[in-house]
């Protein structure tokens, strides 16, 4: 629970200090992606069937695809901001 609270405060800090919302969304997606990889690294270090562990963690932990989707959304926003100026 403490990790979740720290992540929320870190995301609020990122949104507060970055001028561009696109870059803030990219960084938020990167943090979510990294938090999704932590259980994956822990499982593969202990599990003898590494491929099954990777597939299971990708399907049961939606943080990895959600982080990738947020990074893509942030990139689209950054490109839209550049076109406007």
Image: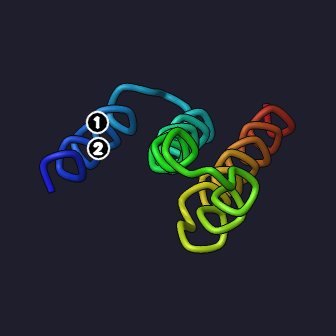
- Seen as rendered, the residue at the extreme right is 83
At x 79%, y 30%, the residue is 85
Q: Are marks 1 and 2 in contact (CB under 8 Å)?
A: yes
Q: In this picture, is 50 found above or below 60?
A: above
Horizontally, residue 78 falls left or right of residue 14, namely right
Q: Which mark is residue 10?
A: 1
x, y percent for residue 59: 65, 72
Farthest bottom residue? 60
In the depicted structure, whether residue 42 falls above or below residue 55: above
Q: Position of residue 22 (x, y in %)?
A: 62, 40
Q: Quadrant of residue 12?
A: top left
Asked whether, in this view, residue 20 is left or right of residue 54, the answer is left
The spot of residue 72 in percent (x, y) is 76, 49
Q: Residue at x 71, y 63 (%)?
A: 52
Choose top left, top right, bottom left or bottom right for residue 33: top right
Q: Which residue is mark 2?
A: 7
Residue 53's place in the image compared with 60, above or below, is above
Q: Measure how far apart labels 1 and 2 are at the Cα level.
A: 5 Å
Q: Quadrant of the N terminus?
A: bottom left
- Label 1: which secondary element: helix
Q: Neighbour class for label 2 at 10 Å: few (<14), some, many (≥20)?
A: some
Which residue occupies the extreme left position in the image?
A: 2
- For label 1, the crowd category at 10 Å Cα-Cα, with few meaning under 14, some 14 to 19 and many 20 or more, is some
Q: Residue at x 49, y 45 (%)?
A: 46
Element assignment for label 2: helix
Give the side of residue 62 with respect to residue 79, left or right. Answer: left
- Residue 10 in percent (x, y) is at 28, 36
Q: Nearer the viewer, residue 27 or 15?
A: 27
Residue, x 73% and y 37% (percent of image)? 78
């Amino acid at each position: 629970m403490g990790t979740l609270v720290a992540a929320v405060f870190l995301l609020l800090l990122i949104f507060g200090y970055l001028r561009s919302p696109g870059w803030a969304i990219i960084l938020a997606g990167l943090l979510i992606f990294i938090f999704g990889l932590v259980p994956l690294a822990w499982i593969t270090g202990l599990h003898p069937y590494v491929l099954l562990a990777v597939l299971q963690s990708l399907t049961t932990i939606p943080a990895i695809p959600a982080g990738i989707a947020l990074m893509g959304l942030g990139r689209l926003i950054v490109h839209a901001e550049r076109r406007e100026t």
